[in-house]
Amino acid sequence: MKSVTHWINGALVDGASGRTAEIFNPATGEVSGHVALASAAEVDAAVAAAVAAFPAWRDASLVKRTRVLFKFRELMEAHRDELAALISSEHGKVHSDALGEVARGIEVVEFACGIPHLLKGGFSEGVSTRVDTYSIRQPLGVVAGITPFNFPAMVPMWMFPIAIACGNAFVLKPSERDPSASLLMARLWKEAGLPDGVFSVVQGDKVAVDRLLEHPDVRGVSFVGSTPIARYVYETGTARGKRVQALGGAKNHMLVLPDADLDLVADAAVSAGFGSAGERCMAISVVLAVDPIGDELVQKIVERVDGLVVGPGDDPASQMGPLVTGAHRDKVASYLDLGVEEGAKLVVDGREKAVRGGGAGGFWLGPTVLDHVPVGSRTHTEEIFGPVLSIVRVSSYEEGLKVINDGEYGNGTAIFTNDGGAARRFQNEVEVGMIGVNVPIPVPMAFYSFGGWKASLFGDTHVHGTEGVHFYTRGKVVTSRWLDPSHGGLNLGFPTNK
Ligand code: NAD
């Protein structure tokens, strides 16, 4: 049984609250360990360490900060397999998929290695006679990241490489369901030479989150998780004067026009719908099939789904692993009956899928396909966050677009077509933050910014890329004049150019 603790001021710190949560091996259903759940006092200890570490880190030269980042990147590369195995053992996703999330996280570290360039300000010589103006950006101080279970390495890495590169001290509150990745990354930061206290981890639940939201020394909060909690974090944090970016849930539609290559579409829909057992905020959960291709497309999807191998994440033959917990599996599975009650046709029932290896008690649910899902039904509109692909039939591009734009969420979407004009029209008209043209999971690269619209994001700043740099810094504008005798004389008027 492992015991997962906090990481405060550069060292492991045992939990002192007396509260813990179970960690499961999703492939067997067995409890593999416990994670400490922080009290407010333990959060205060992490924030106090961050407050103490901040001034020296802020003042460390850009070259020194960048060297730590380069070293961290090198160590992450060297430990990617170990990290992926850890993720897979607690989350359930297959090893190759866990390696993928580590790789995408490392890309943010690589982006942050360019921080000297990213923090360059502007300079205007001679805005008035012998007066110069320049702009600088400075770190906020102590910032916190609160992250979901589905990407225990990548989502924290959307945040902390940039926050730390900008000169902030960062406190991470990972998901209590797969908390171990955070401690490996903390150890690697230390090995990379990051001063103690600049990166801390407090394990925990709502108690820790609430304390971070109310702590006066926490200046900024980045959150990724479900929409109700994202809304709560945004409203609570901003009411206390903090800068908050809160990314929420999703329900991503793939619009398939009749001219698309249906074999490629079926490959993309199955990969994007069932990768990571559908537990991705950019998963495709609804395929909008424009008449008359619906029947042919469903047949092609079903052929591919039937061949998928479901099994433990550490078996290289597995293409899809279990769900994260038993409770989540049961919730996802409840949509199968609900879908049928609402009028959909269950064409592939994931409950009947044979599992290759893995314990009988594992949190299994095979890939499921529901066809003719009625627009506006709960199965269509609610975020299921599991291996359930809904097919919705529409008669035209316009009808498909309306279905997407009427939705509550606006995280990701994709159009599949060979018509460039239709694709261009779609990217212009669709009310979604991240759009794929013949790309089913259009997660932007680290040097662009990630974020949705509507109920998928609260706040106006997306994560990573230049928006990340902006979020973790504050601007100053300096107007400077080095006095000489020509500047003498009183003038009580408002300063204007001379
Ligand atoms: P979650 O909202 O349950 O948890 C996210 C974080 O909030 C965790 O750290 C958790 O401990 C904390 N939390 C949970 N309940 C809380 C409460 N009542 N008060 C305060 N804090 C609380 O989300 P999850 O189940 O871990 O992750 C899945 C969700 O995350 C899905 O909705 C998915 O779409 C979303 N997600 C979104 C993105 C995105 O970029 N938009 C990315 C990944 C995941």
Image: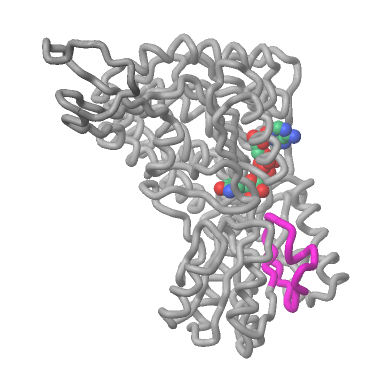
Q: Is residue 476 above or below residue 81?
A: above
Q: Is residue 394 above or below residue 274?
A: below
Q: Position of residue 461 (x, y in %)?
A: 50, 42
Q: Is residue 59 above or below residue 416?
A: above
Q: Position of residue 243 (x, y in %)?
A: 54, 30
Please say whether residue 270 is visible from this viewpoint. yes
Q: Residue at x 77, y 47 (%)?
A: 326
Q: Residue at x 81, y 68 (%)?
A: 339
Q: Is residue 110 left or right of residue 443?
A: left
Please say whether residue 319 is visible from this viewpoint. no
Q: Residue at x 45, y 70 (%)?
A: 437
The quarter of the displayed image where residue 86 is located? top right
Q: Is residue 292 left or right of residue 154?
A: right
Q: Residue at x 24, y 30 (%)?
A: 497
Q: Position of residue 340 (x, y in %)?
A: 84, 72
Q: Is residue 212 above or below residue 181?
A: above
The quarter of the displayed image where residue 272 is located? bottom right
Q: Position of residue 498 (x, y in %)?
A: 20, 28
Q: Which residues are magenta?
A: 367-390
Colour approach in the figure: one colour
- The question of residue 498 being in magenta is answered with no
Image-quarter location of ligand 1: top right
Query: Which quarter of the figure is the N terminus placed in?
Result: top right
